[in-house]
Amino acid sequence: MTTATIFGTGNMGTAIAGLFTEAGVETQTLNSKSTAETVTGDIVVLAVPYPALETIVAAYGDQLSGKVVVDLTNPLDFSTFDSLVVPADGSAAAELAAHLPNSHVPKAFNTNFAATLSTKLVGGQPTTVLIAGDDDESKHTLIDLLSKANLSAVDTGSLKRARELESLGFLQLALAASEKIGWTGGFSLEH
């Protein structure tokens, strides 16, 4: 049986926990500032702001070994909201994978808003979760899990594609923050 641990109790963590529960996955939820818990899930979702990754890796790196660690962060400069803070040829997910060499690190959920995961709709169209990663088994596990929760998911390729997913996530957040789209909107994928 697949189990999950979700770091983050905000809107995204709550929405993803709901999807996992719907898919029949036993789910543990931890506060993003927790540092003394035991991680019980086979799949670990980091539903936290980008700066929290460093703290989680420092506190739980050993426990994350051998697990699927899903990065959904968008590494934005929140002081200006006008750029990503990772190198142009990199991504937050690639940085995380480098710090967790014994884990499988896919990028997923960063191009979705919590409301679109909960309602399973983006502007009246079905919500699709985009996934990038270097381990095919991990990506297929996520795709199957999301399918059980009646969501669509698409494998976008290797972890190199995380940079594009982070750029898309950044654009979507910037549009929502400037009220050009709603937090129930965003980009959908017809397939």
Image (spheres, rainbow, N blue to C red):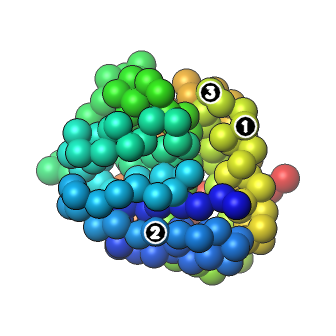
**Taking 43 as reference, is 152 above or below it?**
below
Q: Tag 3's secondary structure?
A: loop
Q: CA distance from mark 3 to mark 1?
A: 9 Å
Report whether residue 6 is seen: yes
Q: Tag 1's secondary structure?
A: helix
Crowd band around label 1 with a 10 angstrom C-alpha radius: few (<14), some (14–19), many (20+): few
Residue 128, how many percent across, how many down? 69, 59
Q: Which residue in the structure is indicated by mark 3?
A: 134
Residue 94, how many percent across, how many down? 43, 28
**Mark 2 or mark 1: which is in front?**
2
Q: Which residue in the structure is indicated by mark 1?
A: 137
User: Which amino acid, mark 2?
Assistant: Gln
Report whether residue 114 is seen: no
Residue 170, how many percent across, how many down? 41, 48
Identified at 29% across, 54% down, the residue is 49
Instruction: Work out whether residue 159 or residue 172 is closer to the camera in this orientation and state it.
Output: 159
Work out whether mark 2 precedes mark 1 in sequence or the reverse, and give the earlier one: 2
User: Which amino acid, mark 1?
Assistant: Glu
**Mark 2 or mark 3: which is in front?**
2
Q: Which residue in the structure is indicated by mark 2?
A: 28
Identified at 55% across, 52% down, the residue is 43
Identified at 64% across, 48% down, the residue is 130
Q: Are marks 2 and 1 in contact (CB under 8 Å)?
A: no
